[in-house]
C-alpha cells in the first residue's frame, strides 16, 4: 500500500519548470512616469525602486566615478527637504532606504508598510527627481571613493578583479574602475554631479518599480498625480560607444603584492553581451563548470585535490559586452597546479559530452535560484527593475526560463567549443613575489603563453 501511494505521488508531481508566472505590468502614466506594478498580497509591505540608465558605463573618462557617487548623494537633500528631514522621514515611516549603482543602472529603493505607500512614494520621487548636491557633500563622496581606491590597492581579491578587467577589456569602459581614479575624483564638483543627474535620472530614462501589497489602479492614479521634471517620452539614447576593439594577449600576469598570505587567481576572457541568444545556455554550461559546491571546479579543486579556499566561475553579460571568469584563492605554492586543473576542466567541457543528469542538475539549480529570488519583494524588485529599462520583464523571464529548460546535453559541448577558449585565457595571479616567480618559472606554465610580472607594494 505504501509503495503504491508513493508511486502515485511521484507520477502526479508537477513539472519542475511549471512555476507560477511572474505578474508585473509595465506602463507609462499620464504625467510621463514609467512604472512596473507587481502586486503581491502575501504581506502588508510595499517595495519601491527608482531604477534608471545611470550605471558606471555612462561615466565619461574625464569624470569617472560620478555614476558611483550620485546615488548616495540623493540623500543629501532636495528642493523640498534637507538631508536631516530625509533621514527623519525615513525613520518615521519605519522604512529602509538603499541607494547604489552597478554597470548598467542606478537605483534608489525604499521598503515600508503598505499603509504608508503614498508617503513613501512621494519621498522617493522627490529624492530621485529634485535632489540638491551640496558642494561639501560631493567633496565627502570623493574622499570616500579615494579611500576605497587605497583599500582596493591593498586587497589581493580586489586587485585580481581589477587587473583581469583591464587585461580583458583594455581601455574600454568595462576595463576601467567604476569608482574612478585619483585624477578624475580630484576634478569632480557639485556641478558635474548635477549635470550627470539631469542627463541620466530623468523619468524618460527611468522606471519606478512597485512590488508588494497594493492595488495597481489606485497606485497608478496616485503616482500619475505627482508633478515631475520635464519628461522626454522618446526612447532613451544609446550607450556611449566603446573606445576600441580589444584583442587581449593571452598570458599569465603575476601581480606581486607585499605582504600576502595566499594567492588570488582570476582566469578568463571576453564573453557575450546580454542580448546574446546563447546566454541562457551559457548559464547552464557555467553552472556545470563552476556554480556552487557540486560544480566541476569545486569538486576537483576543493574537494578532490584540496587546492583552493574558494572557487567559482561566472558569465558576466552586460549591455555591450561581457566576460567569462574563474576566480579562486589558493595557497601560493598551489597556484600553478590550480591553474592547470582549471584549464583541464575547460578542455573537458570542449571535448567530452556532459552527462544528461549533470545538465539537469545545473538547470534545476538555475531555476531554483530564480524561484527563490521571486519569493520576496526585494528579490522581485531587484530582478525586474533593470530588465524593465530594456524589455517587458514578464516576457524576458519567461523566455529565459524556456531557453534554460530547452538546453540539451549534446548542445553544451558545441557551446563550449564556441565560447570557451583555453588558448585565449588571461590569467591574473596576485600574491607574494619570490614564491610566485619561482613556482611559475619552474612549473613551465609559461610554455603556452607569455609570463608577465608587475609589482604593487
Image (tube, helix red, strand yellow):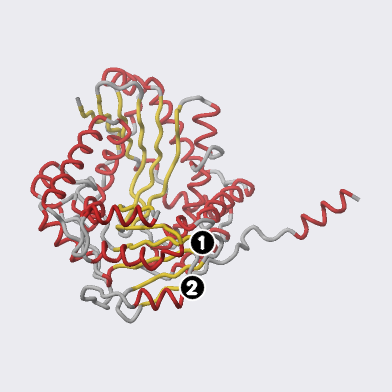
Residue that label 2 marks: 215
Name the residue: 16% across, 41% down. Answer: 143
Q: Earlier in the sequence, mark 1 or mark 2?
A: 1
Q: Residues within 10 Å of mark 1 (few under 14, many from 20)?
A: few
Q: Residues within 10 Å of mark 2 (few under 14, many from 20)?
A: few
Name the residue: 39% across, 65% down. Answer: 209
Name the residue: 43% across, 60% down. Answer: 47
Give the CA distance from mark 1 to mark 2: 12 Å
Position above or below: 17 against 296: below
User: Which image quarter is the C terminus in?
Assistant: top left
Question: What secondary structure is marked by label 2?
Answer: loop
Residue extending furthest toward the right: 1
Q: Can residue 377 be seen?
A: yes
Question: What secondary structure is marked by label 1?
Answer: loop
Position above or below: 329 against 247: above
Q: Can residue 101 be seen?
A: no
- Residue 438 position within the rendered picture, expressed as x and y whole percent measured from the top left: 30, 18
| In the image: residue 183, left or right of residue 410 | left
Q: Nearer the viewer, residue 366 or 338?
A: 366
- Residue 367 position within the rendered picture, expressed as x and y whole percent measured from the top left: 56, 54
Q: Nearer the viewer, residue 450 or 96?
A: 96
| In the image: residue 245, left or right of residue 14 | left
Residue 349 marker: none
- Residue 148 position within the rendered picture, expressed as x and y whole percent measured from the top left: 23, 38
Picture quadrant of residue 445 = top left
Residue that label 1 marks: 44
Residue extending furthest toward the left: 187
Position above or below: 292 against 365: above
Q: Nearer the viewer, residue 374 or 86?
A: 86
Amino acid at each position: 500500500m505504501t509503495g503504491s501511494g508513493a508511486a502515485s505521488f511521484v507520477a502526479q508531481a508537477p513539472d519542475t519548470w511549471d512555476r507560477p508566472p511572474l505578474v508585473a505590468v509595465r506602463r507609462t502614466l499620464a504625467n510621463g512616469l514609467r512604472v512596473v506594478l507587481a502586486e503581491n498580497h502575501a504581506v502588508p509591505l510595499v517595495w519601491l525602486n527608482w531604477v534608471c540608465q545611470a550605471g558606471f558605463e555612462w561615466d565619461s573618462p574625464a569624470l569617472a566615478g560620478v555614476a558611483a557617487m550620485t546615488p548616495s548623494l540623493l540623500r543629501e537633500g532636495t528642493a523640498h527637504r534637507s538631508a536631516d528631514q530625509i533621514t527623519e522621514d525615513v525613520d518615521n515611516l519605519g522604512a529602509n532606504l538603499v541607494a547604489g549603482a552597478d554597470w548598467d543602472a542606478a537605483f534608489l529603493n525604499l521598503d515600508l508598510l503598505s499603509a504608508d505607500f503614498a508617503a513613501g512614494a512621494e519621498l522617493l520621487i522627490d529624492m530621485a527627481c529634485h535632489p540638491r548636491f551640496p558642494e561639501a557633500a560631493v567633496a565627502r563622496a570623493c574622499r570616500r571613493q579615494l579611500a576605497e581606491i587605497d583599500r582596493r590597492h591593498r586587497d589581493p581579491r580586489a586587485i585580481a578583479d581589477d587587473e583581469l578587467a583591464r587585461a580583458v577589456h583594455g581601455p574600454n569602459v568595462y576595463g576601467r574602475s567604476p569608482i574612478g581614479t585619483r585624477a578624475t575624483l580630484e576634478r569632480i564638483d557639485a556641478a558635474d554631479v548635477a549635470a550627470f543627474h539631469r542627463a541620466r535620472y530623468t523619468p524618460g530614462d527611468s522606471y519606478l518599480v512597485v512590488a508588494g501589497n497594493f492595488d495597481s489602479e489606485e497606485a497608478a492614479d496616485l503616482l500619475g498625480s505627482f508633478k515631475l521634471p520635464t519628461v522626454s517620452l522618446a526612447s532613451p539614447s544609446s550607450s556611449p560607444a566603446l573606445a576600441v576593439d580589444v584583442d587581449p594577449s593571452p598570458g599569465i600576469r603575476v601581480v606581486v603584492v607585499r605582504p600576502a598570505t595566499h594567492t588570488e587567481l582570476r582566469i578568463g576572457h571576453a564573453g557575450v553581451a546580454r542580448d546574446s541568444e546563447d546566454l541562457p545556455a551559457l548559464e547552464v554550461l557555467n553552472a556545470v563548470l563552476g556554480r556552487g559546491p557540486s560544480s566541476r571546479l569545486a569538486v576537483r579543486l576543493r574537494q578532490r585535490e584540496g587546492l583552493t579556499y574558494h572557487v567559482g566561475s561566472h558569465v558576466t553579460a552586460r549591455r555591450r559586452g561581457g566576460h567569462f571568469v574563474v576566480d579562486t584563492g589558493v595557497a601560493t605554492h598551489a597556484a600553478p597546479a590550480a591553474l592547470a586543473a582549471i584549464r583541464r576542466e575547460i578542455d573537458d567541457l570542449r571535448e567530452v559530452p556532459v552527462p544528461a543528469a549533470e545538465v539537469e542538475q545545473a538547470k534545476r539549480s538555475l531555476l531554483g535560484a530564480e524561484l527563490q529570488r521571486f519569493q520576496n519583494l526585494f528579490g522581485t524588485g531587484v530582478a525586474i527593475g533593470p530588465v524593465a529599462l530594456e524589455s517587458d520583464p514578464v516576457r524576458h523571464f519567461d523566455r529565459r526560463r524556456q531557453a534554460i529548460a530547452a538546453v540539451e546535453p549534446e548542445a553544451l559541448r558545441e557551446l563550449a567549443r564556441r565560447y570557451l577558449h583555453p588558448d585565449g585565457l588571461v590569467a591574473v595571479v596576485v600574491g607574494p613575489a619570490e614564491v610566485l616567480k619561482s613556482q611559475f618559472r619552474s612549473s613551465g606554465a609559461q610554455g603556452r603563453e607569455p609570463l608577465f610580472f608587475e609589482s604593487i607594494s
